[in-house]
Amino acid sequence: MPSESGAISRDEVAHLARLARLAVTDTELDTFAGQLDVILGSVARVGEVAADDIPPTSHAVPLENVFRPDELRPGLSQEQALSGAPAAEEGRFRVPRILGEEA
Amino acid sequence: MSERASEPTTQRELIRLTAAELAGRIQSGEVSAVEAAQAHLDRIAEVDGAVHAFLHVGTEAALASAALVDEQVKAGSAPSSPLAGVPLALKDVFTTIDMPTTCGSKILEGWRPPYDATVTARLRAAGITILGKTNMDEFAMGSSTEHSAYGPTHNPWDLSRIPGGSGGGSAAALAAFEAPLAIGTDTGGSIRQPAAVTGTVGVKPTYGGVSRYGLVACASSLDQGGPCARTVLDAALLHEVIGGYDPLDSTSIDAPVPSVVEAAKLGAQGDLSGLRVGVVRELGGEGYQPGVRASFDAALQRLEKLGAEIVEVSCPHFEYGMAAYYLILPSEVSSNLARFDAMRYGLRVSEGASAEEVMAATREAGFGPEVKRRIILGTYALSSGYYDAYYGQAQKVRTLISRDFAAAFAKADVLVSPTAPTTAFPIGDKVDDPLAMYLNDLATIPTNLAGVAGMSVPSGLAEEDGLPVGLQIMAPALGEAVMYRVGAAFEASRLADEGALIAPEVAK
């Protein structure tokens, strides 16, 4: 549950930014922590609604599995798929190192 | 042929025509589609330096597309659609194979998608001339276009004010006569609120009514593309072009498009007798500008005069709509925007470090503050330990809001409210106060949460500032026909009494 004051700390925001892969600056952390605190204080109002026995809605239209015929159809070519890549090599996406030194 | 038709139509006249009128002149051969495109391209060149509605103008492709329509007219073949040859401004959130798609973000600067969105493809197939891509708040997050990485759009009614958002570019293009038609997307009000503050018409169709394929996602359970225009009939004509089932969107509704053009024509005859119009008690009153309230009260009197029965309805959970929305939306955003990983397309910075560092540095450099705030907020709301209290509870409130709508629609055929609580505010006023910005969508959010239809139609000017006010009309899922009927009746009646709302000439 949210802390007593309803506050989100600067450290928590820094942790969340790391989880979301956002290398935020110290200045941003200061700004965001204050703003998110205000926003969370406001959206926490959903807790005032007595809804224990209410089913959640994730989607306005009831969703069910949608199937299509299992037929071959054209997709993107390799060239098209790579056309926006920041770096490509030998028909593949070229990416920076993904494993640590010790791995 | 009338005498007037034999006189050449000037460019200034051309850009003032409705889409329906312009399409008629193109089909009769009186005006060519190329002339129509050129008139709007010239208008863009004239005023867009001041308005900044467009992020990209595709001059050559627009003229080539228009030329094809002219060939068809000359050959005497049937038009591809009732809007063939009419120019349109496309929100820069739909993919286009021949133009960049940026979503107002630096992370997609210069990106050329390898495929067309279904909406884009349907516009092309209809012979509609796509003039270019319009400005928007980054990834559709905002109510003013101030969160565009490419600078704000200016409201043609007063260039120092916001045109609404996120689709402020599309709405401003209409109000500045840069295009008679536009496409927007509405996640919490991004079509309707810009329409309200620019004196134009904007429609959020039923969720699933217009394909989301190729619409870059903000919040997938809420996003909905829709038509924008200067008249209700024009919006209806465009709605029928872009609407309908698409096997490429698994949430697309497999049902016929409601007959909105017929409904708009019926409505324009001005008889609403037998219809019940529900006034939502919780949308209005405190927090709404006096001129907005006065315009809304006058609108109710007008609807009553047209024969509608006005009833009051209560939707007690609407007051929690904004809170639920700002938990559900950021949660979906934090997940959807994870795709911008600097690996497959879009921006990449700090080459050479580890993939994770590159990713974090790229997202830091490529996203603006509002997007970052919402990603962090969504990450928080979905965290274990907070999930039940925030995201889970918000989803239950969403159920209750849908039930409120169901109960209200049992008592009324359509519901009405002011579209936005205020008229256009000055650029810079709310940009550093996210919560104040969020309040702009107080009245539009519930329809997105419930997936029902909504539209904004101009209701006049606020007395205190002379700026446009919008009337919101809401209808049940797939109930667009009755919504268009009411909108067209209201529009025809107001036009007869007060005339069109024309933005003052924008500075050159």
Image (cartoon, coloured by chain):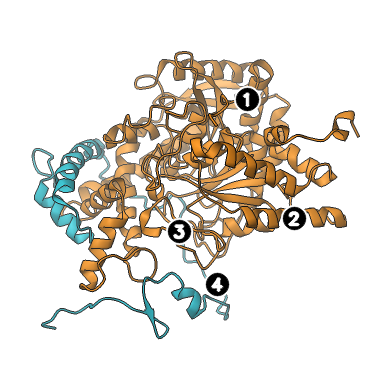
Task: Residue under label 2, please give it.
Answer: B67
Q: Secondary structure at mark 4?
A: loop
Residue B493 rendering spot, x and y as whole percentages: 66, 21
Task: Residue under label 1, please give it.
Answer: B490
Q: Are marks 1 and 4 on the same chain?
A: no
- For the residue carrying disc 4, how many other residues have a C-alpha within 10 Å: few (<14), some (14-19), or many (20+)? few
Image quarter where the C terminus of chain B lies is top right
Q: Nearer the viewer, mark 1 or mark 4?
A: 1
Q: Secondary structure at mark 1?
A: helix
Q: Nearer the viewer, mark 1 or mark 2?
A: 2
Question: Please, which chain is the residue tagged with disc 1 on?
Answer: B
Amino acid residing under circle 4:
Arg
Q: Which mark is residue A13?
A: none
Residue B80 seen in this snapshot? no
Q: Earlier in the sequence, mark 4 or mark 3?
A: 3
Q: Residue at left 72%, top 44%?
A: B36
Q: Secondary structure at mark 3?
A: loop
Using the rendered view, name the quadrant where residue B35 is placed: top right
Task: Residue under label 3, please give it.
Answer: A63
Q: Nearer the viewer, mark 4 or mark 2?
A: 2
